[in-house]
Image (cartoon, rainbow, N blue to C red):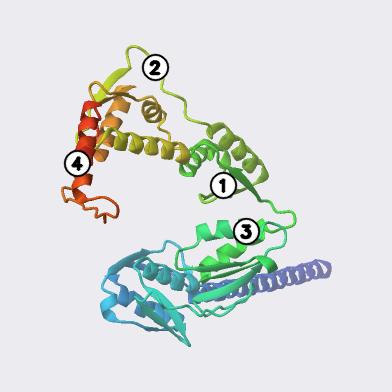
Amino acid sequence: MLESFAKKKLSMKKYNFFNKNLIFAFLIFSVSIFAEDTKDAKKLTTLKANEFTINYDSVSIIEYIQFVSKVCSVNFIYTAADLNFTISITSKEPITKQSVMSSLMQVLRANGLYLVEDGSSIIISKSEDIIEAAPIVEKGTKDIKNPIITRIFSINNVSPEAVFTIIKAMVSKTALIELLTPTRQLILTDVVTNVEKITQLIENLDRAKSPLVIETYTITANASSTLISLAKEIMSPMIAGNPYLLIPQDSTRKIFIVSTPALATKTLSVFKSLDIKPEAEVKTLENQQIFIYKPVNRTQKDLKNALEDISSNLKKDGMPQAGLIEAIDNMKWISETNSFVFSATDATIAKLQKVLQGLDTPVSKEPSFFLYNLRYVSGDKIEDDLDELASKFKDQDVKDQNLLDVL
């Protein structure tokens, strides 16, 4: 009996000990979960304090400026008459204070307004003479309060001129960008978000072993816009989300390619394949037509020179107008009928007709005068000589009627 009681007692102690341990473990686990939830809640509170979701539909820009002023703790000075437009802004995800300020800056710039910082205030004006004296802010600076900043970049591993050309094509016209070639430095003044994005791009380009490269293609036969449009369409399936920029510099007839080494090499190959002289139109008896044009208001010489200038410019600019160029280069003048003869397709003849209509316009009816002071012979003698010259021109069948009329 005693032995049985002792066993039961021992069993109860083990049970109680197990229950106590279980309860203790549960309490520790609950406290841990509560602590994690509290930590996450604090993070969420911090996130909401620094980021905002904006949904404005056709509100006055002044109302949005007041919102930005309150959120970013910035004073704005403006003339209400300059701000007589509305905007709509929708953000699917929370955005930072910097993004809120940058969005306002871009909207104001797009509406022809200029900005300048004056202490803790920002002046909004329509004057083009306004200058943004923005502070210099180094990379890595936290809590940037100025909406417009200046950053100085040192270019070490790539061509500063190439980087300058690329960046200048990407920033807005109101941004200030300068290149100091002797020191290989680039200075940029713009809104904070734009400067930060440009910083990332320059760092990628200027790495000792950059994942991106800059290649240069020199144009030989076509327009840069035509080549870029076709190359982007051809390369589109191969880009796969990689950085891919094609920047034209028409003054030097060059295109800068910024991308991965493989894509840049492939793009160079595509440009070489595309940048060839346009092929002449295929001529057959069925598609060739004869077009005869008789000048109405202009002389044969004037029209011929104007058409040849057009052909020369089309060749120089690389315009894909092979049929029109060939028709002009092969035109004939028939003196018996005072007419031009062109051989081309119907489509090219239609273009020629439009060109000639624009060129063969009436000459101004206002007379012009040329005065000459006689020094050696009398006026009567000069008049007789001019009459004789006009008579000879008529006998020789001179076609310049304007000259005959003057004489």
**Mark on residue 283?**
2
**Mark on residue 384?**
4
N-terminal label among 1 and 4:
1
Kind of residue indicated by mark 1: Lys
Residue 301 image-quadrant placement: top left
Q: Which residue is drawn at 47% across and 69% down?
A: 99
CB contact under 8 Å: marks 3 and 4: no
Locate residue 5, reporting x and y percent: 78, 69
Q: What element carries label 1?
A: strand
Kind of residue indicated by mark 2: Lys
Front one among 54 and 37: 54
Q: Residue at x 29, y 75 (%)?
A: 83
Q: What element carries label 3?
A: helix
Front one among 53 and 371: 371
| Residue that label 3 marks | 161
N-terminal label among 3 and 4:
3
Front one among 78 and 224: 224
Real-space CA distance between mark 2 and mark 4, rounded to the nearest whole angstrom: 56 Å
CB contact under 8 Å: marks 3 and 1: no
**Relative to residue 350, is residue 229 drawn left or right?**
right
